Amino acid sequence: MTDQAVSELKSRAIRPKLSRDDWVMRGFILAIGAWLVVTLLLPLYSMLSKSLESKDGAFVGLGNYIEYFSTPALFYSINNSFFIAIVSTLITISLATVFAFILARSCIPGKAVFKGIALLPLLAPSLLPGISFVYLFGRQGVLKGLLGDYSIYGPIGIVMGEVFYTFPHALMILIAAFSIADARMYEAAVALRTSRIRTFFTVTLPGIKYGLISAIFVVFTLVITDFGIPKVIGGQYNVLATDIYKQVIGQQNFEMGAVVSVVLLIPAILAFAVDRFVQRKQVAMLTARAVPYEPKPHALLDKIFFVYCLIISLMIVGIIGMAGFASFVSFWPYNLELSLKNYNFDLMDGGGWSSFYNSLKMAAYTAVFGTIVIFTGAYMVEKANGFKIVRGIIQFLCMIPMAVPGMVLGLAYIFFFNSPSNPLGFIYGTMPILVIVTIAHFYTVSHLTAMTALKQIDPEFETVSASLKVPFFRTFLRVTVPVCMPAILDISIYLFVNAMTTVSAVIFLYSSDTTLASVAALNMDDAGDVAPAAAMCMVIVATSATVRVLHALLTRGLSRRTQAWRQR
Amino acid sequence: MNLVSSESLEKQYLQIRNLTKIFGDFAALKDVSLDVFEGEFVCFLGPSGCGKTTLLRAIAGLDIQTQGTVEQEGRDVSTLPAAERDFGIVFQSYALFPNLTVADNVGYGLVNMKADKAKVSARVEELLSLVGLSDQGDKHPAQLSGGQQQRVALARALAMSPGLLLLDEPLSALDAKVRVHLRHEMKELQRRLGVTTIMVTHDQEEALTMADRIVVMNKGVIEQVGTPEEIYRHPASLFVAEFVGTMNFIDAGRGPKGEVVLGDLTLELSPREEAKLNGGDVITCVRPEDIKVRNVDENTVNSFPVTVTDLEFLGSFYRATLNNDTLLNHEIFGDFSINLVRDRDIQIGNTIRVALPVNRLHIFRKGK
Ligand SMILES: Nc1ncnc2c1ncn2[C@@H]1O[C@H](COP(=O)(O)OP(=O)(O)OP(=O)(O)O)[C@@H](O)[C@H]1O
Ligand SMILES: [Mg+2]
């Protein structure tokens, strides 16, 4: 058939009649699309347009940007941000690559424990390492001597904090990359009598290439957009993320805040684009994988590896432990008697214990509603017929949050929801806006988890239902949801823990009725109440850890009931 | 396209007219027309990617065609979505709901019809016994063997008593023995229920043993429609001859009067083949089992001497490799019974005289 004949035929293509299911699905898809537009696209758009306006709302083109780039102090922040991001990324990636290699490719004992410890930082707000370093290396720090004449307040402290905070993120990606090795390549290397070192450089490293690139960009983005650590331990050392905070909270200069946000968006988006590109290649490698690699013991190397993991784990435990210990000390460093005084949050500024209850509520709402919205959305996008363009647009929108720093999103929410002309303005300053911004902030990873689970179930379930005249939503509730329950629980716990620990997305949006634990910790630290801040961080860590354990138990219990079919 | 006349007395169930399906700029189906009669078992047979599944999904309304019409029981269903058509379907993966029991899988559509509980479970019982799984209702699909899972899928597809049963390679995920067994079982069941059935397969043996009629497809078009015997005995195209069964292909030339010649041997053809002739070189085809040895002498038509260059024992018969450098452009195969090989002392190196029976010889134009 000629091209012309084909396009001629297509132009006269018959129009299929849509079934009721098709209409319902399209309704849902439009609803999800509208949700993403309102909670993501429009706020970002208002931020962009705000950056082009003067204080009184007149359009000034690039005026604000010109002003920004001609203010040396602000301009230095770009340099600082990149410096911190590059150095932290180098250190984190080096440490995490070795750690991941050991966990995936060696026979040391206690791997599960090491992995568990390495993932602990995920349970803490990012200001925790900052606070901990104040106690370790600050003016009255226990290990102050180690730093010599250098001060922890500044780049050194920031980099150390960032390494602690980003380590588990890099580790997870790298472990995955190491685990997809093809054993046959190693057998070939052994057969050719290649030395271990040479094998490492010619087989292992190329094998994790994509995982490594992905980890580099993820860490880079996390660092350059992080706000908690430089805020707590940065001292006079300014970075982009703290500049936004200072412009907005300190000087009420929203326009300049918007400009810095846009500047911060650029490296984040670039890093994100590279990461997505690389992820696609990694998937292709995964499907082509062959024989899984079985590590073999090696007396000497395994000892070295063990010591390495031990040191890193001790450091992580030490950092969390230091904050924990400090939180129980009556008055550092003068009265080392242990007490619960610092947990008496109601006596301090920052919201007291009610901020903790607010956080719990916010995390629970985020987990429940977020999971429902995100999983349903992913289902509709994955399983609907036709409507290709809209589905493509939604897929794209779902990827945006990954590239948007929380602080930028929070600021964008101010511009959008606090505008007098917005009919949705009534949610400003309430609990719902905190829940909504948190769902938006953590949308991408949750969406990808849901998509992965949905792609694994038989694509013909909906077809079979249609042939049996059963509406799709019955099959969704009776089959798809139970079958995907493990992924659904994963999404909800991810949302819960992140909602507990996040600072950046909510810092501009809480009100006196809706103070949150992580924000309270930040504010107490700001006011000089460092020990209570440490105590609040510990409460958050304990909560996240408890919920994780509950989640593990629940998953096991549920899988015994709803996943009984998995066992023969 | 030939509609088989002997069948036209029966009631037409499905009328497919000028179906074209385009993916991007690739035509997966090109102007396909076909009739299916009530109660008939039709197989779509063809190599991978020829458009069998595409045609089946168009019939079901799962992937509606770009052009053309589908009429089911006199009703034009061309644009209707799957939910508004009348069919049951079994996929290669079975698509059983893993978290539901076998009984719940089978009764999945019944429950929705608001039939009362007792009726539903009686119907489920009936269906399960129909497929021989009466005592397995409480198990989950993962606890069943592949063959049992296939039968559950079949029971589920039959639950709503559909007028049309669609099967997309329903047996291909099973191992060979189970497959052969289930072939008979499914065919038997289909005959008993009298449900019009279309099955997609790329396994010709499956098609030949199960189908009332076979639709041979290639590159988005129908090459031939006919009973298994017709397809096997009288392939309508070089493609069908090559795709179904084993076939010898011998390049032939043309004599001065247009006769078909192998070297200096003029071939005698049946009138049926004779009618297909026009100018140009042709390929003659003959199945290995049709090559004749008994009662062949110098005077037998289409006979010539060959040397046996190889003899392969295949259990119930021998496959001999035969050569004649002057007449044949390459070696051909002959399938000989064990008796024949013993009686005629057929051995490697021996020369025997074989004949290509007139009514078993097919010719096709070369370079099709
Ligand atoms: N959704 C689609 N988009 C693009 N091309 C498609 C799509 N579905 C099928 N095709 C193409 O149409 C052609 C026919 O596909 P179809 O699935 O009907 O083949 P088939 O005969 O069932 O093959 P198999 O025996 O491998 O199942 C193939 O070339 C295939 O690549
Ligand atoms: Mg197919």
Image (cartoon, coloured by chain):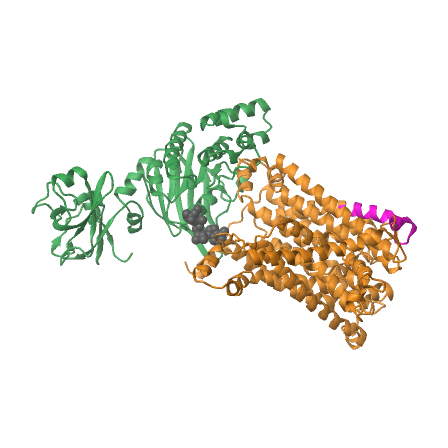
Chain colours: A orange, B green
Q: Is residue A516 magenta?
A: no
Q: Return the residue found at the far front.
A: A300
Q: Is residue B80 left or right of residue A546?
A: left
Apparent side of residue B355 relative to residue A450 in the rendered image (left or right) = left
Q: Is residue B136 above or below residue A341?
A: above
x 12%, y 53%: residue: B265
Q: Is residue A567 above or below residue B250?
A: above
Which quarter of the picture shows residue A350? Answer: bottom right
Locate residue A56: give its quadrant: bottom right
Q: Main secondary structure of the magenta part?
A: helix
Residue drawn 30% across the image and 45% down it: B244
Residue A17 visible, this angle = yes
Foreground of the two, B306 or B20: B306
Write down the region rendered in magenta. A340-363
Q: Which one is in front, A519 or A270?
A: A519
Can the viewer see residue A435 in this picture?
no
- Looking at the image, which is closer to me, A198 or A482? A198
Q: Decide whether residue A359 is among the magenta residues.
A: yes
- Residue B98 x %, y %: 55, 37
Q: In the rendering, at what x and y percent does residue A489 appear?
A: 67, 44
**Relative to residue A49, is residue A382 drawn left or right?**
left
Image position of A283 (left or right of A399): left
**Which residue is nearer to you in this view: B114 or A221?**
A221
Q: Count of labels shown?
A: 0
Instruction: Give the answer, above or below, for where A371 lies relative to A305.
Output: above
Q: Point out the image quarter for the N terminus of chain A.
A: bottom left
Q: Residue furthest left?
A: B298
Query: What percent of the width, then of the height, locates residue A361?
Result: 80, 45
Tell me where residue B217 appears, x and y as whole percent: 37, 47
